Image (cartoon, grey):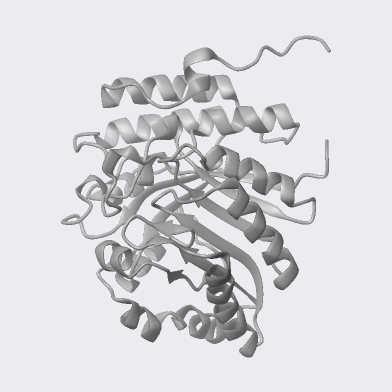
Amino acid sequence: MKNYPKVLITDETLRDGLQIEREGVTVDEKLELLQMMVDAGLNRMVVGAFVNPKWSPQMADSLEVVKRLKETPGVSFFVLALNERGRLERLEYAPPLAIDQIHATHLHACPIFIQRNTNRTLAEQEEQWQAPIARSKAEGLQEGAIGLSSGWGSNFSGEFTHEMRMQLLQKQYDAWQEQGIKVTRVDMADPMAWNTPTAVAKDLTAITELFPSITDFRLHLHNARGLAMISMYEAIKCLDHRHSIIADTSIGGIGGCPYCGNGQATGMIPTEDFVHLLDTLGIPTGISVDGLIEVSARLSEILGRPLHSQVALNGALPKGDK
């Protein structure tokens, strides 16, 4: 195998994937899909979100899903929580839920998106963004994370520059450093699909140079413009064995944020396609592409429409004798 980074997959089918789909996917169907994903070898899955059902009705049954989860050795189940109430509720159900062991600061670049998605302004963000640092200090944690949302661009505000992204990350990095806490991870979320392979490679290369303590890169890339898989491949190529990529994907490439202004035109990297790519690169995952294809077929049946995976349609490359 070449000098590639370690790659971990976090499947977002039941959260980001379903939050923009029609209502009516039952708890039983969600749990059926979840078990199929576990059987296929996936070991990191976001199973829902503790958010206001008024704004995300498809997530209204997340607590019921969590209550019916069975703790599975070697498998981590996560739930998204956007406020303190959600975070406290999440702690009540850990286990079976897994909790991130480090806290992360996170800045939104787009003033319109942060208002639509979290009901906050950039001014309110400025007042609150250092709270994870204070929590980490109080808990005696030694590591922290920094992150951006919509850093590459916004359907409302347009493209953002590489320089702006680095400035926003530097601001967070310095704040952690001032408290004597080492920054080891960066989270880059792209809900409106403004990622390009060139920009992603340039950013990650710069991050390794500017912030050498960062070894983990979480990439949440949406695929509305068809570049997410290529961008993820560039990320793999520009990092090495010292690093880990935490890649967010979804079965069939479903997903999207209802507040991005592009509706169901968005989507994510299909989990089955991405695992197939990693197989061709020789990067081990322990995940069965054939098993994921079965999940994709079942999900398509539940949603009543074709999905976006090419591997699910055509199958993986045959593995013959070399």
Q: On the rendered image, what quadrant is the C terminus found in?
A: top right
Is 258 on the left-hand or right-hand side of 289? left
Residue 270 in sight: yes
Q: Nearer the viewer, residue 16 or 174?
A: 174
Which residue is the extreme one toward the left?
54
Q: Quadrant of the N terminus?
A: top right
Residue 182, placed above or below residue 53: below
In this picture, residue 240 sits left or right of residue 255: right
> Which residue is at 64% across, 81% downward?
181
Relative image position of residue 277 (x, y in whole percent): 64, 30
Which residue is pictured at 60% across the width and 32% down the height?
Answer: 275
> Residue 268, how many percent across, how many down?
44, 40
Q: How many marks?
A: 0
Vertical side of 61 occupied by 287: above or below = above
Q: Position of residue 124 (x, y in %)?
A: 32, 81
Residue 9: quarter of image? top right
